Image (tube, rainbow, N blue to C red):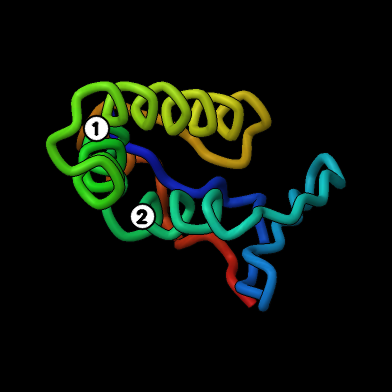
């Protein structure tokens, strides 16, 4: 499954993390440094498993208990962003057919 930022989201990096605004719902959020790192990986990698694997390797190394906890937390965060329509998840390759422009970033 491939992830991409919703076309309705306007976002920018700030000293405190990342600020998000959903232009259709009016939802405004500020992501802390950890969530901002996940967001940035989603933007660059666009794949849930790749994001989880990269963060697990970065913070847990080969420690299986820490890797499992990171997997759970990142998966939960991504799911909450998909549920709030801030991120969208599609079958790999399907976003190329449905998405014409990148998400707005200021």
The quarter of the displayed image where residue 51 is located: top left
C-alpha distance separating marks 2 and 1: 11 Å
Quadrant position of the C terminus in the picture:
bottom right
Identified at 38% across, 24% down, the residue is: 69
The quarter of the displayed image where residue 27 is located: top right
Could you tell me residue 82's position as x and y percent?
55, 30
User: For this rendering, which residue is in front, 55 or 81?
Assistant: 55
User: For this rendering, which residue is in front, 22 or 42?
Assistant: 42
**Is there any visible trace of residue 97 in the rendered image?**
no
**Could you tell which of marks 2 and 1 lies nearer the N-terminus?**
2
Q: Which mark is residue 49?
A: 1
Farthest right residue in view: 26
Q: State the SS at label 1.
A: helix
| Residue with the mark numbered 2 | 41
User: For this rendering, which residue is in front, 48 or 67?
Assistant: 67
Could you tell me residue 5's position as x and y percent?
50, 49
């Amino acid at each position: 499954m491939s992830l991409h930022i919703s076309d309705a989201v306007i976002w920018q990096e700030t000293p405190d993390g990342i600020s998000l605004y959903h232009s259709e719902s009016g939802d405004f959020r500020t992501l802390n440094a950890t969530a901002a790192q996940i967001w940035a990986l989603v933007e660059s990698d666009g794949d849930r498993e790749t994001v989880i694997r990269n963060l697990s390797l970065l913070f847990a190394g080969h420690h299986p208990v820490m890797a499992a906890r990171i997997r759970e937390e990142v998966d939960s965060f991504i799911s909450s962003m998909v549920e709030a329509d801030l991120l969208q998840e599609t079958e790999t390759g399907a976003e190329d057919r449905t998405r014409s422009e990148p998400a707005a970033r200021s």
